[in-house]
Image (cartoon, rainbow, N blue to C red):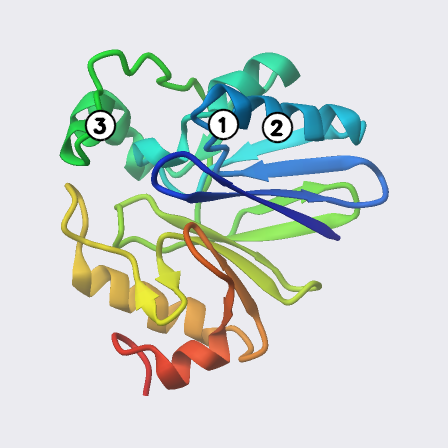
Amino acid sequence: MNIKIFEFNPLGVNTYVLSDETKECVVIDPAPFYADEKELLLNYLLDQGFRVKHLLNTHLHFDHIFGINLLASQFGLSVKCHPDDLYLLEDISGQMQLFGLPGSNADFKPEIGGYLNEGDIITFGNQSLKVFHTPGHSPGSVVFYHEGEGCVFGGDLLFYAGVGRTDLPGGNYDDLLNSITTKMFTLPDSTVVYSGHGPATTIGFEKKNNPFVGK
């Protein structure tokens, strides 16, 4: 499986395009904000000749959804997410204003095309991703685990030597720690964690060194 990583928008969100030899792909957290970012992502998908099978979101905070409508329109899709995050779409402007960003013209509210729940399997090409529901950063946060490749796409749950913030509406610190210890930390230590922001890490490293949840 090929993993292409883009870092987009003022908050530095990692957008992931997963593909294989079949040319089918999924896009996780489509987050381009600026026109050149949107052009970069769209041109990559088109130039590679990919068939986008799914648009997936780890959660629905505004910084992770900027590019959904662009890809939905281009490829005739709608995004899949956990239903517990739907409330976040009702006040996108408010979310942006918390970060000092102008949100009065937040007209990118996406259409939801399906729900992701614990244990769901997302398939594309010869690949499969298992969904874990991991509330804490938001009530509907999920991660996508690829057992064969030994990697997990964790959104804003677990970072390199850090964890997701829980001071935003719907966040819960106890839930976050529980999601990390009962879901993420049950994966093999060699599992690579591709986070929603910042560099990749591994489960083993975080178990030993993370100041919030490590040993």
Q: Residues within 10 Å of mark 3 (few under 14, many from 20)?
A: few
In the picture provided, is 103 more to the left or to the right than 59? Answer: left
Say whether disc 1 or disc 3 marks the residue closer to the N-terminus. Answer: 1
Q: Residue furthest right?
A: 21
Residue shown at 35% from the left, 18% from the top? 109
* For discs 1 and 3, the disc positioned in front in the rendered view: 3
**In the displayed structure, would residue 197 be above or below residue 63?**
below
Amino acid residing under circle 3? Leu
Say whether disc 1 or disc 2 marks the residue closer to the N-terminus. Answer: 2
Amino acid residing under circle 2? Leu
Expressed as whole percent of the image width and height from the top left, the position of residue 189 reads 53, 80
Do the residues under discs 1 and 2 have CB atoms within 8 angstroms? no
In the picture provided, is 160 more to the left or to the right than 76? Answer: left
Residue shown at 21% from the left, 21% from the top? 102
**In the displayed structure, would residue 76 be above or below residue 112?**
above
Residue shown at 59% from the left, 22% from the top? 39
How far apart marks 1 and 3 lie (CA) works out to 24 Å
Say whether disc 2 or disc 3 marks the residue closer to the N-terminus. Answer: 2
Q: Residue at label 1?
A: 79
Q: Residue at label 2?
A: 40
Amino acid residing under circle 1? Val
Q: Residues within 10 Å of mark 1 (few under 14, many from 20)?
A: many
Q: Residue at label 3?
A: 101
In the picture provided, is 102 more to the left or to the right than 179? Answer: left
**Nearer the observer, 31 or 144:** 31
SS for callout 1: strand
How far apart marks 1 and 2 lie (CA) works out to 20 Å
Q: Quadrant of residue 51?
A: top right
**Nearer the observer, 41 or 157:** 41
How far apart marks 2 and 3 lie (CA) works out to 23 Å
SS for callout 2: helix
Expressed as whole percent of the image width and height from the top left, the position of residue 205 reads 46, 80
